[in-house]
Structure formats: C-alpha cells, structure tokens
Amino acid sequence: MGFGGTTKSWSKQVPVISSEYRTVVFDHRGCGGSAQPQDGYTIEQFSDDAIAMLKSVGIERAHFVGYSMGGRVCQDLAARYPEFVQSLVLAATAANLNPLNQYCLKASSYLYEKFGPEAAAAFDPVLGFTRAYFGRHGRELELALGHPVADPPPLHVYRGHVSAIENHDTTKVLSKIAAPTLVMLGDQEWLNALPDSLALAQGIPNAKIKMLAGGGHSLHWEIPETFNAEVLDFLKQHTPISAGM
C-alpha cells in the first residue's frame, strides 16, 4: 500500500483478487498492525520486510502489486530480489521524487506536525480523487473533516515514511527489473503524472503502460472495478498454467 496506508486500503481489491489467487496484504513497518521501531524507514528496508514476510508464509515467488509508495517499494524489490517476482504491477507511482511530490510531502508533514493527523487527512482527498468523485461524494468528505483518524502512525513513523519517499530513486536500477511489468495510472492522475509513468515504462525492459479512464491518484479506490479487471487480466497473462491458488 501507499504512504500511511494499511491493509484496509485494499478492501476493494482483496475479495476480487483472492477469488482467483492466493492473496497476501500487509502493513509496512510503522503502519496498522506492524511494529513501530524508531528507525529503519527506507524503501530498501520496506523491500526487505516484504521479502521476509513472504518467506515467513512459505511463498517463494509471487505477483507483486504496488500502489504509490508501495510501487516505489516494488521497484526496489524487483531490482534486488528478481527471483521472487513473477510479475509486477506499478500503480500511480514513480521512480523518483518530482517537485509536486516534494511540496505535497512537505505540506502534509507541516499539517501533521503542527495540527495532528486529522489535519493532514483533510489534505488527502485533494491528492487522491478526481473532480467527478467530489461531485458524487463531496458532502460525505466534508462531514468527515476533523474526525479521528483510524490507527494514525506516531510522528516518528510519519517522518520516517516521508524520508523514505524523499530519498527514493530507482532510475539507475530500473533496467535490472526482469519481470513483466504493468505501469498503471489514472487519466486524471496529477501527483505522479504521465511523465513519471512513461519514465518507468521506458526504463523497465519488459514493461507496458495502461491509462485508466476516470481515475486520479487513488484509482484503486475510485474506479476499483476497472483497476481490478486490469490487474487480473495482467496476472493471468503471466501465471504459469500449472500454478493454482
């Protein structure tokens, strides 16, 4: 999942994907039910954590789906642990930090540190959703303003995740990713916009790019049916015939 997200953020994907594939979701260190150590908040450490988690449940090779910050983790993981990666889906993500990312991280951090997680959460829908989504759900988003945030990470974790994103740059190792890769973005994505996805698709040898109509940054939440269908179609193209659930 992305920055600050938990397994709950995959609630529109798990029932669909798990009907056809064994599906494992997890919280990055510091988030949800995972431990909250004082250090270790780097994209590389998140990759190591993911591999350790897979080993712990006996998985030797898998399809990986990474969204936003999770996509950054998947890039690093696929470059350093290629033997674990059957295929790769990178959604709404980038190989490094663009200036808009940088500003949004700074603004969110300012709100979180000065006014608390509820203030930072008020900024999230603007980053994630399209104008059409606000047209359908604007009133409920307004009513949610200021409500307590479920499982907010402590400040040291929040800062650690911000630092991990700020220091992430896989531009020089994308060529090491050997797995078939699908780069996905919404046609109204602006946080990690089309140039970021094109850089990924051009830098990864066996990659293709897909733009989904009606999606912004949070395309997995706003257009889940389209997102899920594209993911499943891609996984089926790259699943050995002998493989089961």
Image (tube, rainbow, N blue to C red):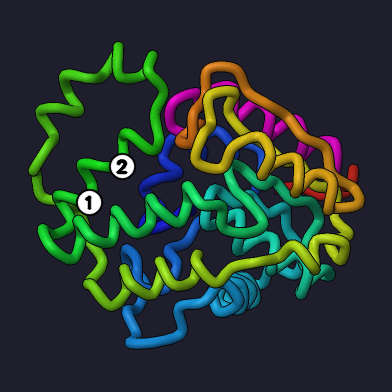
Would you say the residues marked 1 and 2 are in contact, meaning their CB atoms lie under 8 Å apart?
A: yes
Tell me the SS state at disc 2.
helix
In the rendered image, the vertical position of residue 144 relative to residue 110, given as above or below: above
In the shown orientation, is residue 76 left or right of residue 154?
right
- Taking depth in this image into account, of 22 and 27 the one nearest to the observer is 27
- Taking depth in this image into account, of 31 and 207 the one nearest to the observer is 207
Question: What's the magenta region?
Answer: 220-239
Q: Main secondary structure of the magenta part?
A: helix
Residue 124 is marked as 2
Kindly identify which residue carries mark 1: 120
Q: Which residue is drawn at the image coordinates 22% and 51% (left, top)?
A: 120
Q: Which residue is drawn at the image coordinates 67% and 57% (left, top)?
A: 95
Q: CA distance from mark 1 to mark 2?
A: 7 Å
In the shown orientation, is residue 218 left or right of residue 194?
left
In the shown orientation, is residue 82 left or right of residue 122?
right
- Taking depth in this image into account, of 67 and 56 the one nearest to the observer is 67
- The three-letter code of the residue at mark 2 reads Asp
Q: How crowded is the residue under tag 1: few (<14 C-alpha within 10 Å), some, or many (20+)? A: some
- The three-letter code of the residue at mark 1 reads Ala
From the top left corner, tell me how far across and down residue 239 is, in percent: 83, 45
From the top left corner, tell me how far across and down residue 202 is, in percent: 84, 46
